[in-house]
Amino acid sequence: MSHRKRDRCRSCGQAELERVLDLGNQPLANSMPASLDEFADERTYPLELAICRTCALVQITDVVDPAVLFEYYLYVSGTSDTMAAHHAAYAADTVRDYEIDGLVVEIASNDGSLLRRFAAEGARTLGIEPAKNIAEMAREAGVETLCEFFGREVGERVRSERGAAACVVANNVLAHVDDPRDLLSGMAALASDDGVVVIEVPHVREMVARLEYDTIYHEHHCYFSVAALLSLCEGAGLSISRVDHVPVHGGSIRVHARPIAALANHAEEVLELARSEEEQGLTEPARYRRFADDARANKRELLALLSDLRSRGKSLAAYGAPAKGSTLLNYCGIGPELVEYTVDKNPLKVGRYTPGMHLPVLPVSTLVERRPDIVLILAWNFAEEIQRQQAEYLEGGGSFLVPLPEPRIL
């Protein structure tokens, strides 16, 4: 069965999910048609956001089979200068802070970009990545990689075969699994008794504050607060020792956890962060209903601006074909009649079409060749990098438009 609807929370198992935002039926955000012939076979699935009234985990209600989502994948983490710098600092800081001289294992290691940075710091590395094509890219780059989905059973097996890990890392992946507790339990089982588990996830506080509704798509099952992570980690045998705020992906948190044998309780400063979230309303449905109202208003404003620009004879294109761009385009109904095409640096995406709305994906060089008047930045989390790299386009009179938290021309 490729699709099912959840009626219980992924974390606590309670049947107290309250729906707060409906983004309509949407295609899978990284399933990009390669030709016009594939348009008719494109499937869509409901995309609804809910919150658990028991443990406050924000989550979507529909589950698509992970084999459908991830067996062949188009996202690679090594194409952005911003992420390259992030990975370098991440590895250096982690090795320094924990004096790591043993094995570092990354869950959903993608093309091995982060693990290569850990290797440069002197660590032994192992990647575990379910997408066959991406795992092969990592191996070709010299990163030992197992190709499989990760959970407690795999964590226990890898520990018995390879030994315990000094550090187990999961970046931007905990949200991608339907059973996040199983993934965390696997990380706890794989880590040595005095090892560290490091998880980086987008922070639901930033998603709400910056109106990042486009980060909601079928691959992202969950949207994390510190409050929700406390309960999840406890159920997996982990205690949170530290939470760092990092700017990537629209505002993320890096969660440092230790096996309960090494750290019996969550750190007090972490508990204080959870209390602060409660005071901001991030554990209650009302805040997310306001978020839904703001998303609907943004849709109206963005469509009005794009329509006005086209009515005045402006030519429009887009930059990027990220998963978040698929949600934005489909929710707002932005197709080639408004935005002619988009461009992307990822060679796996060039030559394809965006899901659902079917904007052609062209090389980045197209911006200078065709010089559209306005370019809608779908990959808005890299807006500064994009503007810097596209100086020639800007100097030629072009302009960039960011859609969130309010549509504006830069």
Image: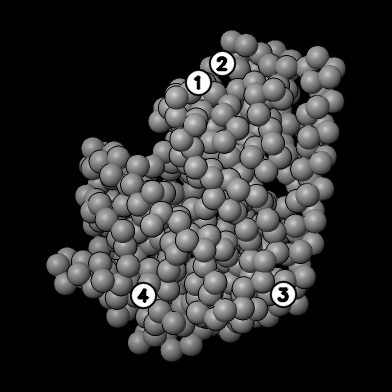
The answer to whether residue 242 shows anywhere in this view is: no
- Residue at point 59%, 72% (across, down): 57
Say what secondary structure mark 2 lies in. helix
Q: Residues within 10 Å of mark 4 (few under 14, many from 20)?
A: many
Marks 2/4: CA–CA distance = 46 Å
Tally of marks: 4
The residue beneath circle 4 is: 185
Q: Earlier in the sequence, mark 3 or mark 1?
A: 3
Q: Earlier in the sequence, mark 4 or mark 3?
A: 4
Q: Are marks 2 and 4 in contact (CB under 8 Å)?
A: no
Tag in front: 3 or 2? 3
Say what secondary structure mark 1 lies in. strand
Residue 276: image location, x then y, percent: 70, 76
Q: Amino acid at mark 3?
A: Glu
Marks 3/2: CA–CA distance = 45 Å
Which numbered tag is attached to residue 363? 1
